[in-house]
Image: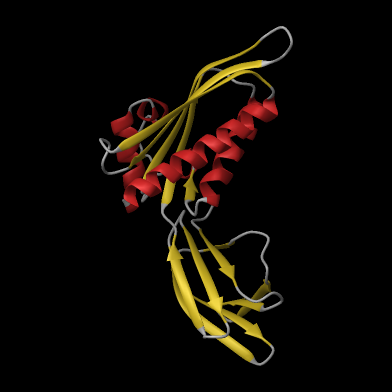
Amino acid sequence: IPPAGEVAVFGGVGALLYVDDRLVGALPLSRPLLISPGQHRIALQENDHRQEWPVKVLDNRTVEMRFEPESSAVLVTQLPAVFLILRGAKMPAALQSRVQLAIEQAVQSAHFATLHESELAVGKDGDLEKCLRQPACANDLASRNNADYVLTADISEYRADKSAKLITQIDFTFSESRVLAQSIRNDEVCNKCTATQLIGMASESVRSLLSMWTGRSRG
């Protein structure tokens, strides 16, 4: 997979979107654009009004561009990246995928970008699984891959009772990639719940964790 970053573009509904003078679609976009790293020019065309702005795209990062046609202003924001680690007790693959998706969506809704294990540059001699089990190593790996934060979801317990209800505990830890000592935790227990309830719990727990971090940073 060639290197790429994401560009999320917001503006007037129906505006034509150009990347380096090439028409790529119209707003609103269903998802961010995938663009090769480097300098690019993004333009919106609404009737006879055109706005164009340069943007630097970074590998595995997301940048937001908000075009304001009334003022001709463009707000460009490089979203901070969160490296997500999901590990622990064995969980059915289909359910684990749903839990991971819910966590990613919660992170993105808080205006963070997500970075996955498959997107990391580990190095020729790197043992990824071993590294991810060691907080200091995982944070160093995230930092070397330009991730600002690390979110670990550690499934410390998972089992189903006779009625197929789930007994699950997920321990969430959020920290800066460069300052391991500064971290916050949120441990959640889902006792005799359904898969849907578990997914909702995971999503809400991450939203709460990120809200706590944002509030602490601002304070």
> Looking at the image, which residue is at 52% across and 83% down?
52
> Looking at the image, which residue is at 63% across and 32% down?
199
Instruction: Look at the image and name its color scheme.
Output: secondary structure
Can the viewer see residue 56?
yes
- Residue 55 placed where, x, y %? 45, 72
Q: Which of the two residues, 181 or 188, is positioned nearer the viewer here? A: 188
Report the residue that reaches farthest toward the right: 163
- Residue 36 placed where, x, y %? 50, 64
Report the residue that reaches farthest toward the top: 162
How many numbered marks are there? 0
Q: Which of the two residues, 189 or 55, is positioned nearer the viewer here? A: 189
Vertical placement of residue 62 versus 188, above or below: below
Vertical placement of residue 109 versus 70, above or below: above
- Residue 167 placed where, x, y %? 60, 15
> Looking at the image, which residue is at 53% across and 72% down?
66
Report the residue that reaches farthest toward the front: 219
Q: Tell me if 144 is positioned left or right of 85 in this view.
A: left
Can the viewer see residue 94?
no
- Residue 151 placed where, x, y %? 43, 37
Q: Which of the two residues, 210 or 46, is positioned nearer the viewer here? A: 210
> Looking at the image, which residue is at 47% across and 73% down?
75
Vertical placement of residue 63 versus 147, above or below: below
